[in-house]
Image (cartoon, grey):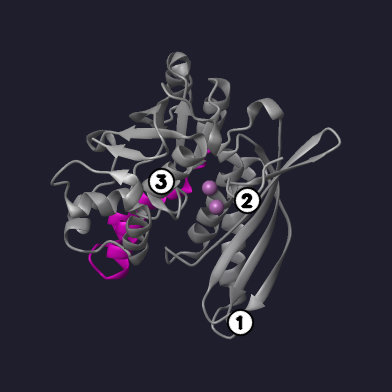
Amino acid sequence: MVGPGDDAGIFRYNNTLLVETVDVITPIVDDPYTFGAICAANAVSDVYAMGGIPLTALAILGFASCDFSSLVIKKLLKGCIDKLEEAGACLIGGHSIEDNEFKFGLAVTGIIETKTILKTDGASPGDILILTKPLGTGIITSAYKRGKLKNHALKEVVASMLKLNKTASKAAVMCGAQSATDVTGFGLLGHGLNIAKSSGADLVISYDKVPLMKGVRKYAALGLAPKGAHRNFVFCSRDVIFPVNFPKEAQLILSDPQTSGGLLIALPSKGLKKFDNVAKKEKMSYWIIGEVQKGKGKIVIE
Ligand code: CO
Ligand code: CO
């Protein structure tokens, strides 16, 4: 029913709709338990971005077996299993290979109902654009890797990456959204353009309303944005209209690759009040960053 190009594929078997996705990443934090949990939150996120419910997961692990003790792997898997449990999903197997660069990820299977599918091509002019997590995981973790910030400064980023997009997905579905995606490796601009192009509409985003993690502006201005942010910017820039004299660091922030980023939801305006109620009840943060307008698949930054 849904093939490559969306956050996850959807396959119909009789009356059951399966949602399937896979995501593998390299370590972004030192602690194996935390990294395992972030990997799980990141991998189930694509099921949430479709409006589905994750059920089972298979782990994919690449590591140099002589360099890591089995205790490290046990902690990694424990973090993963605990986070999956929070999502209501279960690790039922996996596969490991010898690899000089450590990698970990999951293939996740979930279920979904036709009426709750959030496709990237479902945004309509007039919809409100909602983002559920601040931007900055790429810039801040890359600043950390280069020794520019202390361990405790990573707290906000780690807490954000550990947060499941479960409530955000539920709220989007309950409030009548037709379109959502999770902001991950291609940054807000890349994933936003995917919605804009497939929906045949423009996304108008107010930069001042885009939530940023603490320190992001500073580190971006210091030239600490990761390579991926530069690549994303080059890839997206011809379809994005920036204001005159828009700072380079702001362009990179909007292009910053996110790990376990939030959902970008196109919500019909009549669903906003209910969305706000759900968010308050579930203590979920969200930011209105712009709206969908008639157009040809561009992003306009104001
Ligand atoms: Co995705
Ligand atoms: Co993905």
Judging by the rendered image, the residue that carries numbered circle 2 is: 4
Q: Position of residue 31 (x, y in %)?
A: 46, 64
Q: Secondary structure at mark 3?
A: helix
**Range shown magenta:** 138-166
Considering only vertical position in the picture, is 218 above or below 205? below
Judging by the rendered image, the residue that carries numbered circle 1 is: 65
| Residue 84 visible in the displayed image | yes
In whole angstroms, how far apart are the C-alphas of marks 3 and 2? Answer: 27 Å
Magenta stretch: includes residue 18: no
| Residue type pointed to by label 3 | Ser
Magenta stretch: includes residue 160: yes
Q: Position of residue 274 (x, y in %)?
A: 48, 15
What quarter of the picture does the N terminus occupy? top right
Q: Which mark is residue 160?
A: 3
Q: Position of residue 168 (x, y in %)?
A: 50, 32
- Horizontal relation, residue 233 to residue 184: left or right: left
Tell me: is circle 2 under 8 Å from ligand 2.
no
Tell me: is circle 3 under 8 Å from ligand 1.
no
Whether tag 3 and tag 2 are in contact, CB under 8 A, the answer is no
Counting residues from the start of the chain, the first of labels 3 and 1 encountered is 1
In whole angstroms, how far apart are the C-alphas of marks 3 and 1? Answer: 30 Å
In whole angstroms, how far apart are the C-alphas of marks 2 and 1? Answer: 33 Å
Classify mark 3: residues with Cα within 10 Å, few (<14), some (14-19) or many (20+).
some
Counting residues from the start of the chain, the first of labels 3 and 2 encountered is 2
